Image: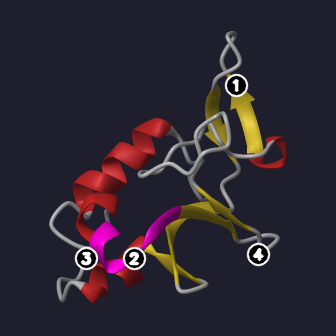
Protein backbone atom coordinates (compact mmCIF):
# COMPACT_ATOMS: atom_id res chain seq x y z
CA UNK A 1 0.00 0.00 0.00
CA UNK A 2 1.29 3.43 -0.96
CA UNK A 3 1.97 5.90 1.83
CA UNK A 4 -0.07 9.10 2.10
CA UNK A 5 1.81 12.29 1.35
CA UNK A 6 2.39 14.36 4.49
CA UNK A 7 4.73 17.18 5.53
CA UNK A 8 6.89 14.58 7.29
CA UNK A 9 7.18 12.56 4.09
CA UNK A 10 8.16 15.69 2.13
CA UNK A 11 10.97 16.26 4.65
CA UNK A 12 12.09 12.64 4.24
CA UNK A 13 12.09 13.00 0.45
CA UNK A 14 14.17 16.18 0.70
CA UNK A 15 16.67 14.35 2.91
CA UNK A 16 16.80 11.42 0.50
CA UNK A 17 17.45 13.62 -2.55
CA UNK A 18 19.43 16.33 -0.74
CA UNK A 19 22.52 16.28 -2.98
CA UNK A 20 20.64 16.04 -6.27
CA UNK A 21 18.32 17.98 -8.53
CA UNK A 22 15.51 16.09 -6.77
CA UNK A 23 15.05 19.04 -4.39
CA UNK A 24 13.93 22.55 -5.22
CA UNK A 25 17.06 24.28 -3.96
CA UNK A 26 19.22 22.29 -6.36
CA UNK A 27 17.11 22.54 -9.51
CA UNK A 28 15.45 25.95 -9.43
CA UNK A 29 18.25 27.45 -11.51
CA UNK A 30 17.57 24.76 -14.14
CA UNK A 31 13.96 25.96 -14.49
CA UNK A 32 12.21 23.26 -12.47
CA UNK A 33 9.07 24.24 -10.53
CA UNK A 34 7.93 22.20 -7.48
CA UNK A 35 4.69 20.40 -8.25
CA UNK A 36 2.50 17.42 -7.45
CA UNK A 37 0.90 14.85 -9.78
CA UNK A 38 -2.14 12.76 -9.01
CA UNK A 39 -1.42 9.38 -10.55
CA UNK A 40 -5.11 8.51 -10.43
CA UNK A 41 -6.30 11.46 -12.51
CA UNK A 42 -3.10 12.68 -14.17
CA UNK A 43 -3.75 16.17 -12.81
CA UNK A 44 -0.66 18.26 -12.06
CA UNK A 45 -0.62 21.00 -9.43
CA UNK A 46 2.16 23.55 -9.09
CA UNK A 47 3.13 24.06 -5.47
CA UNK A 48 1.39 27.14 -4.12
CA UNK A 49 0.95 29.14 -0.97
CA UNK A 50 -2.58 29.25 0.49
CA UNK A 51 -3.15 32.61 -1.23
CA UNK A 52 -2.42 31.08 -4.66
CA UNK A 53 1.08 32.45 -5.24
CA UNK A 54 3.61 29.94 -6.58
CA UNK A 55 5.75 28.46 -3.81
CA UNK A 56 9.50 27.90 -4.26
CA UNK A 57 9.29 24.54 -2.45
CA UNK A 58 6.76 21.74 -2.03
CA UNK A 59 3.85 22.85 0.20
CA UNK A 60 0.68 20.88 0.91
CA UNK A 61 -1.33 23.95 1.92
CA UNK A 62 -1.97 25.20 -1.62
CA UNK A 63 -3.35 21.90 -2.92
CA UNK A 64 -7.04 21.65 -3.89
CA UNK A 65 -9.60 19.99 -1.63
CA UNK A 66 -10.09 17.05 -4.01
CA UNK A 67 -6.66 15.63 -3.07
CA UNK A 68 -6.89 16.33 0.67
CA UNK A 69 -7.81 13.37 2.87
CA UNK A 70 -7.05 14.71 6.34
CA UNK A 71 -6.93 18.12 8.02
CA UNK A 72 -6.02 19.29 11.51
CA UNK A 73 -8.66 20.82 13.79
CA UNK A 74 -7.36 24.23 12.65
CA UNK A 75 -7.97 23.28 9.00
CA UNK A 76 -4.35 22.76 7.95
CA UNK A 77 -3.67 19.89 5.57
CA UNK A 78 -2.33 16.84 7.39
CA UNK A 79 -2.33 14.32 4.50
CA UNK A 80 -3.23 14.05 0.85
CA UNK A 81 -4.21 11.11 -1.32
CA UNK A 82 -1.62 8.35 -1.69
CA UNK A 83 -1.94 8.64 -5.48
CA UNK A 84 -0.33 12.10 -5.32
CA UNK A 85 3.46 12.33 -5.64
CA UNK A 86 5.80 15.27 -5.35
CA UNK A 87 8.00 16.24 -8.24
CA UNK A 88 8.64 19.09 -10.62
CA UNK A 89 7.39 20.67 -13.81
CA UNK A 90 9.99 21.63 -16.39
CA UNK A 91 9.10 22.90 -19.87
CA UNK A 92 5.55 21.56 -19.50
CA UNK A 93 6.55 18.05 -18.42
CA UNK A 94 6.19 16.50 -14.96
CA UNK A 95 9.30 14.88 -13.46
CA UNK A 96 9.32 12.73 -10.35
CA UNK A 97 12.03 13.53 -7.83
CA UNK A 98 14.06 10.55 -9.09
CA UNK A 99 13.76 11.73 -12.70
CA UNK A 100 14.79 15.26 -11.72
CA UNK A 101 17.70 13.86 -9.69
CA UNK A 102 19.10 12.25 -12.83
CA UNK A 103 19.50 15.72 -14.30
CA UNK A 104 22.27 16.36 -11.80
CA UNK A 105 24.01 13.12 -12.68
CA UNK A 106 23.43 11.63 -9.26
CA UNK A 107 21.01 8.77 -8.94
CA UNK A 108 18.81 7.90 -6.01
What residue did someone put label 2 on?
A: 31
Give the class, few, some or many, for how many residues have Cα within 10 Å of label 4's Cα (few <14, many ≥20): few
Q: CA distance from mark 4 to mark 3?
A: 24 Å
Disc 4 secondary structure class? loop
Q: Are marks 4 and 2 in contact (CB under 8 Å)?
A: no
First in residue order: circle 3 vs circle 2: 2
Residue shown at the point (56%, 48%) measured from the top left: 5
Query: How far from the left and from the top, in percent, is residue 70?
Result: 71, 30
What residue did someone put label 1 on?
A: 71
Query: How far from the left and from the top, in percent, is residue 28?
Result: 33, 67
Residue shown at the point (60%, 45%) measured from the top left: 53
Residue shown at the point (47%, 38%) measured from the top left: 7
Does the magenta segment cover residue 48? no
Q: CA distance from mark 3 to mark 2?
A: 21 Å
Q: Is residue 67 above or below residue 79?
A: below
Magenta highlight range: 28-34
Amino acid sequence: MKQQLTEQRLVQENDCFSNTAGVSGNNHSLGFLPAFRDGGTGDIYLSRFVDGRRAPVHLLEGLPDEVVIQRTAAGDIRAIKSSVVSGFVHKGRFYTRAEAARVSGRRH
